[in-house]
Image: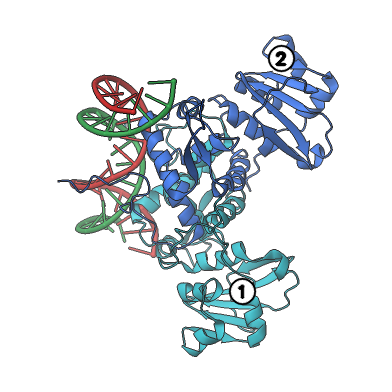
Chain colours: A cyan, B blue, C green, D red
Amino acid sequence: MESQKITNSGLSKSRRWYPDSCGTALAMELVGERWSLLVVRELLLGGRRFSELRAGLPGLSANILTQRLEGLEASGVLRKRTLPSPANAQIYELTKWGRALEEPIFALSRWAAGSPLHDVTLGLSNTAFMLSLRTMIDREAARGFPAELGFRVGGEPFRARVDDGRLEIERADPEGAALVFEGEPLTLASVFYGPDSLAESQRLGKVRFTGDPSLGQRFVDLFGLPAFDND
Amino acid sequence: MESQKITNSGLSKSRRWYPDSCGTALAMELVGERWSLLVVRELLLGGRRFSELRAGLPGLSANILTQRLEGLEASGVLRKRTLPSPANAQIYELTKWGRALEEPIFALSRWAAGSPLHDVTLGLSNTAFMLSLRTMIDREAARGFPAELGFRVGGEPFRARVDDGRLEIERADPEGAALVFEGEPLTLASVFYGPDSLAESQRLGKVRFTGDPSLGQRFVDLFGLPAFDND
DNA sequence: CTGTATCCGTGTTGATACTG
DNA sequence: CAGTATCAACACGGATACAG
């Protein structure tokens, strides 16, 4: 009567494994459950607390988040850590191996962005918007882009810069950056990926921008969604 | 009494979508269900029939396979096609967009191959073994590898060659290739990725090999599993 | 041979409410 | 804030029966 209780905590052996040694199958085993990869996405820009994860993942209930965190910890993708002394808070952060999921996640995102079913009105976490910039930037066109970037997305501060065509992002105060974009994730997305122009959105008060307008537009133009071309 | 019946056929609208515009979320929506990505994997080397898919995916029952095929067709990942005249068989083949899943799949596989939980004794489809070669080849070391390769994996014929460090694979008769490897998927995997040497496996009759032995060994040495190095 | 439809037992998922 | 408990709905996989 006391067995049967271990089921489903973390990486239980009772899970139905794919009878398949292929790496794809193992990957689906490890991070293929519903929400898992989105939890990892939220952690890609640094460790987060339970409540921050919930905030970035509307629709995910607490118990499922707990299950996913247990599973991902058991798989060695992330680690639960208690912050030093005064903070004393618990955070979840990716292991080195977990951080290596960035490449698969970006590959999947780029692929999915080509779908006609892509609905850009659903919701977007602050982290997801910032990562989308890193994912979708045109590396060739971006090479050598000079300005230091700042963002305040849904109130959260970020800093970024272009390095060898890649956008490096960190959570830090945007104060003093040459270009600073400020707004809600979906609004910013409509400027970077949609039809809205930076100047017009700014005039309507939906986005705040400081810096040289033409350089700002040049930065925005580094981004765009791929066209769907299926056979 | 007649509603409620549309649920779950193909891409039903009743599915619980992630309230998230992020590409990762959409990707999980489209190919994140159990088995979906493995079905795509089986199709990466060309169209297959229902029964061939089942053979390559033990553990997947017929009704679930039907559901996945419907879903993936509705998403535009694959297409059901009836072969011209004499054959008259139905095959499932990836669309151009579906073929673009190769990159995300390979990224996931390479990532997962670094896990200590990787169990290489589970089973491996013929297609999965051939794709693993394409995934795991050391591109630098492989550059310029001269020989035409042939394989007979679990009875299925394949041909391959190295082009710019990448392994190009097609389903075709291996007859006449400079190096030909023949055996069961798991046995071949233990030679390419595990401790078994080519010569010894050949002596034991587990693998048949024709061609220059040292060139054969040189080819085998282009493959290996990454070490797990987690913080 | 190539699937499709249905039922059924089980496990997974998720929303709500609740506790330390 | 950080989870646990409970319960309902659904997805999965096996078996079987059926259709072109």
Expressed as whole percent of the image width and height from the top left, the position of residue A221 reads 63, 74
Indicate left or right for D5 with A203 as reference. left
Does any portion of residue B225 appear in the rendered image? no
Residue at 52 percent across and 29 percent down: it is A20
Q: Chain of mark 1?
A: A
**Which residue matches tag 1?**
A159
Residue at 69 percent across and 10 percent down: it is B205
Q: Nearer the viewer, residue A25 or A109?
A: A109
**Which residue matches tag 2?**
B208
Q: Amino acid at mark 2?
A: Arg
Expressed as whole percent of the image width and height from the top left, the position of residue A230 reads 54, 52
Q: For the residue labelled by badge 2, is the local secondary structure a helix, a strand or a loop? A: strand
- Tell me which corner region of the image, top left, top right, bottom left or bottom right, holds residue C11: top left
Q: Nearer the viewer, residue A30 or A107?
A: A107
Q: Nearer the viewer, residue B129 or B8?
A: B8
Residue at 69 percent across and 64 percent down: it is A139
Q: Quadrant of the N terminus of chain A?
A: top left
B215 lies above or below B93: above
Q: Amino acid at mark 1?
A: Arg
